Image (cartoon, helix red, strand yellow):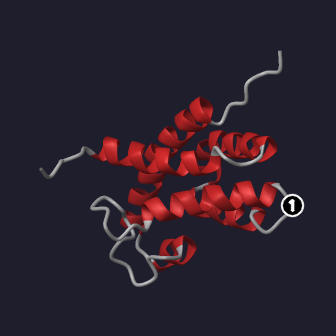
Amino acid sequence: MNEIKTIEQQRAEHALNNICEESGKARKLKEKYKSYASALPANILQNGFGQAMAMELASAKDSKGEETAHKQLYEHIQSWLCEVNQPNSPYKNVEHNQNLIIAIIKNDQKTYIQAQTEAMAYLEWLKKFAVAFLVEKEDS
């Protein structure tokens, strides 16, 4: 039977799959990922979606440890917004749909706003699952 899922269910499933990938990584990396995922929505609102994603991409090339967390966060958002098989992905039908920054630059304002709105909704799920699944048990 073919299941029909709401957009919220699809966002949640995609985010959970990405968080599960992160759960096997080192504690410090998980903490950084959780921190960056929590801070990114405010960064988007303050600086704009394109600037915030450009900063994530630039930070991904920065110092060790942090770069992996920034890179993973950027790639998780990119995979959601550029997913060809996802009906609500704003960049699914664009020529450069595998590169989020190029898709942001090459598209119109309407698509940019849709992408920003979708990124914010998706980040809510990433943040919730990061808090729920990327926690370390305290030593007794």
Picture residue at 55% right of the left edge, 58% below the top: 76
Give me the residue at 69% from left, 46% from top: 33
Instruction: Give 29 or 73, whichever is nearer the viewer.
Output: 29
Q: Quadrant of the C terminus?
A: top right
Q: Please, is residue 102 above or below residue 124 in the view? A: below
Q: Position of residue 59 (x, y in %)?
A: 77, 62
- Amino acid type for the residue under numbered disc 1: Lys
User: Residue 109, position in %: x, y?
Assistant: 42, 67
Which residue position is annotated with label 1? Answer: 64
Query: Among all residues in the image, which is located at the extreme front?
Result: 140
**Relative height, residue 134 to residue 65 (above, below):** above
Q: Could you say where residue 87 lies in the image, as x and y percent from the top left?
A: 27, 62
Indicate left or right for 122 with 35 as reference. left
- Count of labels shown? 1
Say whether residue 52 is visible: no
Give the x, y percent position of residue 37.
63, 44
Q: Residue at x 68, y 62 (%)?
A: 71
Kindly give the residue lying farthest to the top in the view shown: 140
- Camera-side residue of 66 and 20: 20
Q: Is residue 81 left or right of residue 77?
A: left
Is residue 112 visible to the viewer in this orientation of the structure?
Answer: yes
Q: Residue at x 41, y 52 (%)?
A: 118
Q: Residue furthest bottom?
A: 95
Q: Is residue 11 above or below residue 68?
A: above
Q: Quadrant of residue 132?
A: top right
Is 101 situated left or right of 96 in this image? Answer: right
Q: Residues within 10 Å of mark 1 (few under 14, many from 20)?
A: few
Q: Quadrant of residue 68?
A: bottom right
Q: Nearer the viewer, residue 107 or 81?
A: 81
